[in-house]
Image (cartoon, rainbow, N blue to C red):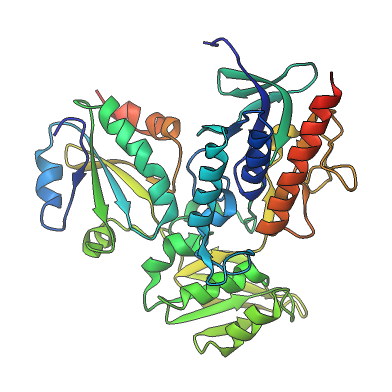
Amino acid sequence: MSTTPAHHRVIIIGSGPAGLTAAIYVARASLAPLVIEGEPSSTSDQPGGQLMLTTEVENFPGFPEGIMGPELMQRCRQQAARFGATFVTEKATRLDVSERPFRVWVRDVQYTADAVIVSTGARSLMLGLEEEQRLIGHGLSTCATCDGFFFRGQEIAVVGGGDSALEEAQFLTKFASKVTIIHRRDQLKASKIMQERAKANPKIEFAWNKQVTRILGDSSVTGVELTDTVDGSVSTRPLTGLFVAIGHKPNTDLFKGILDMEDSGYLITQPGSTRTNVPGVFACGDVQDHTYRQAITAAGSGCMAALDCERWLEAQH
Amino acid sequence: MSGSIVTLTSSSFDETIRSSSTPVLVDFWAEWCGPCKAIAPVLEQLATEQAGKLSIAKLNVDDHGSIAERFGVMSIPTLILFKDGEIATKMVGARGKSHILDEISPHLS
C-alpha cells in the first residue's frame, strides 16, 4: 500500500564515503537530504559501504595512526546527521527519473525529490563458479574480518592480486597457519608497501599464474582446482577456507535503462563533473569510478556531486 | 523473557532451546564482526515486535566456540531458528529485517 510520498529536495542513494560526504555538503547547503543508506548485508552494499568490512584504514588522510573502517563511516554518518541529513535504513528498489519530481521507491514506500545523487558503490565480485552459491559461508567468503576467526590453525587461500587481497591475506595470518595468495598473473597490482609486507610474512605463500576453476567440497570447502594461466596445467590444492578478493562490481542494476552506463556497469558521468545523462541526477564514488576506487577519491567525488547538485538546483529557478 | 534478548552460554544453550515455548532465533556473533553489529538493532526490533511468538538469543562465538562448532558455523553473523529443539532454518550473512522475517515467518505460529 502506497503512503503519501515524502518529498525531499535531494535524495542520496547509498551511504559509503561518497554518499555521506555528499550528504554533509548538501545538508550544509540547507537542503536537508534524505539518505537511503541500504540495509544490513555481509557483501559490501550495506550502510557505510565497503569500509564496513575492513579493519584498519591507514591511507585515509587525517588519521596518522589509522582508523577502523566502521568507525570512520560511523563518524561520517554522524557528521551528516549533525547538519540535518536524515536516513532510511533500507535499499532503494526502484527509480523513475522520467519526469519531475523524481521518484525513488523502497518496496512500496515512495519518495520524491528534485534531485538525486547516486552513490551505491560496488560489491565484491565472485569467481562465477556454480558451486559458489552453495559454499558461501561454508568455507567460501568475501569478508576476512567476518570469517577469518573460524580458520584458526588451518590452511586457507585468498584469490586476488590487489591491495584488498593482500590486506585480507595479512589479516588472515592472525588465525590461519598458512595463507596462499592465488593470482592469475605473475605480478601483483597492490601497492608496494602491501607487497613488501606480504612477502615478508612467513605465513603467506604465493601461487602465481593460477586461476581457481573449481571449488571442492560438499558441505564445506575442502580444496580448489587450479588451472595455470600460462600452460593450462591443472592441479588441486587442499584447503578449508577460500577468500575471494578479486575486485568489485558496481551496484547499478537499479539503473539499467535509466542511466547511461558502461558495459561493465559503471555509470557514465560527464568528464570533470558528476552529471549523468539525466539532468538533476548525479553519480559519485565507486559506482562511477573504475580507475581510482579509494575511500578518499569517493569522498572527493561526493563533495563534487553535492556542489554540482546544489548549483543545478539553484539554476532551476 | 518477553521482548528481551537472551544471552546464551555453552552451559545454558541446550536447556534454553529445549525449554522454550516459542521458536528461538539464535544469533551467532562476535565483537569484532561489523555485519553482526549491523543486525543487532534489527534483532532488537524483532524481539519487541514478535514477543510471545519468537524468542531471540545471542551466542558469542569467541566465548563459546564449541557451540558454534557443533552447528557448523563458519561465518558470522549466522542466524539459526530452532523450533521444538530442531533446526528450522539457517541464515548465513547479515540481511535486513524484511529478509529475516520472510525466512522465519513460515515457522512462527
In the shown orientation, is residue A314 left or right of residue B28? right
Determine whether A94 is above or below B78 in the image: above
Determine whether A278 is above or below A178 in the image: above
Judge whether residue B3 can be spotted in this image. Answer: yes
In front here: A64 or A96?
A: A64
Instruction: Quadrant for the C terminus of chain A, please.
Output: top right
Quadrant hosting residue A314? top right
Quadrant hosting residue A281? top right
Residue A193 percent across, percent down from the top left: 65, 81
In front here: A181 or A200?
A: A200
Judge whether residue A287 can be spotted in this image. Answer: no
Q: For the point 18% across and 51% down, which residue is it?
A: B8
Residue B21 percent across, percent down from the top left: 12, 32
Q: For the point 59% across and 77% down, which residue is it?
A: A181
Q: For the point 58% across and 54% down, which residue is it?
A: A50
Residue A9 percent across, percent down from the top left: 69, 23
Determine whether B60 is above or below B102 in the image: below
Residue A39 percent across, percent down from the top left: 50, 38
In front here: A95 or B65?
A: A95
In the shown orientation, is residue A296 left or right of residue A80? right
Q: Residue furthest right?
A: A271
Q: How many marks?
A: 0
In front here: A239 or A192?
A: A192
In the shown orientation, is residue B106 left or right of residue A90? left
In the shown orientation, is residue A198 left or right of residue B105? right
